Image (cartoon, helix red, strand yellow):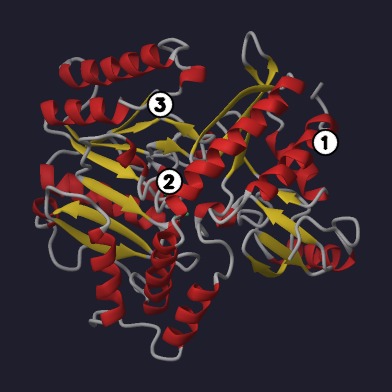
Amino acid sequence: MDAPCLRVPHPGPRTRQYLERVRRTESAAGLTFGLSAETVVMERASGAAIEDVDGNVFLDFTAGFGSLNAGHCHPKVVEAVQAQAARGHQAMSLGADVRLRLMEKVLSLIPGPSEKRIVLGASGSEAAEAAVKMARRATGRSDVVAFEGAFHGRTQGALALMGRKGQRAGLPSFQTGIHHVPYPYPYRSPFGRDEAACLEGTLRYIDEFLKNPASGWGEVAAIIIEPVQGNGGMIPAPLGFLRGLRGICDRHGVLLIVDEVMSGFCRTGKMFSYLHEEGVEPDILVLGKSISGGLPLSACVAKKEISEACGPGTESSTYAGNLVACASGLASIEVYEEEGLADRAAEMGGYFVRRLGELAERHAVVGEVRGRGLMVAAELVSDRASREPLPAAKAASAAALERGFLLYPGGHYGNVLAFLPPLIIGEGHVDKAVEVLDEVLLAVPGMK
Ligand code: PLP
């Protein structure tokens, strides 16, 4: 499918009918309208293209919010899913070869030296919660440090780690002992605008709070971090930060939980994004999304001694390790490796950031362009000098949809155009995206 290719103006007549029905049916709490009030209604999809019910074809730079690193409906994945669906779907509390092979494969991707154990889940939120529970059991401590802007899921436990007000509004506090600290975000760091000052200041702050008996923190079990903050606006932690954090954790007996739900499986140019730094071994790794290439599956991978602190059956759920999802995962990981998608992500990410840099020269609202592999973003500001955020990402996303292009509106202030294309894209896809964005940046009110 050639994308974008609009046969009728979006939203077309069938889409409008659907939208009327869905507004009468689905709670507004759902995510159907995450990109725009006039969302795309998918008929079928392939690679980086989505055809809607009106025959319009959209170029997809969201890839299921990072769950489709091999693209929509990769033939190998489809074949594996179809074959497994005919053989068996569910094996709760039973063994199954496909699940074991998936678990062995995932563990084989994670370098040592420590021995690890894996527990499967059905969503990233579930795996993030399992990680925190395991860390608390293993250390006998209660507190957890998370970062401003963090996103680890919407379930009650994971929500406590969330940095965003939107999803927390109207709810009482869920767990005590969760402390948020500044994310190493050089563009908006309280510790200074250059990477080194941001990195050192953030580490010093965390170290000081862990050390100081009067900091207000209790005994800290773990620090949980996204190596590239995704929902927060595709913010790569400066290289060296994770190594510094690892050292702090070691000094204070705190476990390091690395959440790679969005950044994992080749997305940033390595199998996992923490591997951009030498000598960082997480105590617990949280995986989801592209672990399965589009079916519900997640994993919490813990050092063996941490996992042994958890009794039988204390984690998992009915659909954890669903066999069709495991088959999809095995096939997807094979595709990532066979098609060299980590290298492709690095190469295309570099090209995309360069092309966005050209856009930034023409559009003063683009304050910063950044990325690691194909976690890429353009941050919007109303004034480059003061870096005042311009919260126009959702409006830009709607304007992009009208032009046949899906982007991910995000950022701490709703001011980041974020991009998570499938890793199979080529330069032609990026060029089309940049062409649309060039128009979008002129079309949105408030942009000059
Ligand atoms: N962790 C990270 C880093 C995420 O980006 C997300 C979802 O976007 C989650 C956890 C939660 O995953 P799920 O939506 O599958 O529960």
Task: Report the disc number at residue 183.
Answer: 3
Residue 183 pos. (x, y %): 40, 26
Q: Residue at x 51, y 61 (%)?
A: 70
**Whole-number angstrom distance, CA of label 3 to CA of label 2:** 16 Å
Q: Quadrant of the N terminus?
A: bottom right
SS category of the residue bearing label 2 = loop
Dot 1: what SS? helix
Which quarter shows the C terminus?
A: top right
Instruction: Specify whether residue 262 is in view.
Output: no
Classify residue 361 by image quadrant.
top right
Earlier in the chain: of badge 3 and badge 1, it is 3
Three-letter amino acid code at the position of disc 2 = Ser
Which residue is found at the position 71% from the left and 43% from the top? 431
Q: Nearer the viewer, residue 104 or 361?
A: 361
Q: What residue does disc 1 label?
A: 439
Give the x, y percent position of residue 10.
85, 56
Query: Which amino acid type is marked by label 1?
Result: Glu
State which mark lies toward you, 3 or 2: 2
Number of numbered labels in the structure image = 3
Is 28 on the left or on the right of 284, as rendered?
right
Please state if 13 lies on the left or on the right of 43 as rendered.
right
Residue 263's tag is: 2
Q: CA distance from mark 3 to mark 1?
A: 32 Å
Q: Earlier in the sequence, mark 1 or mark 2?
A: 2
* Mark closer to the chain start, 3 or 2: 3
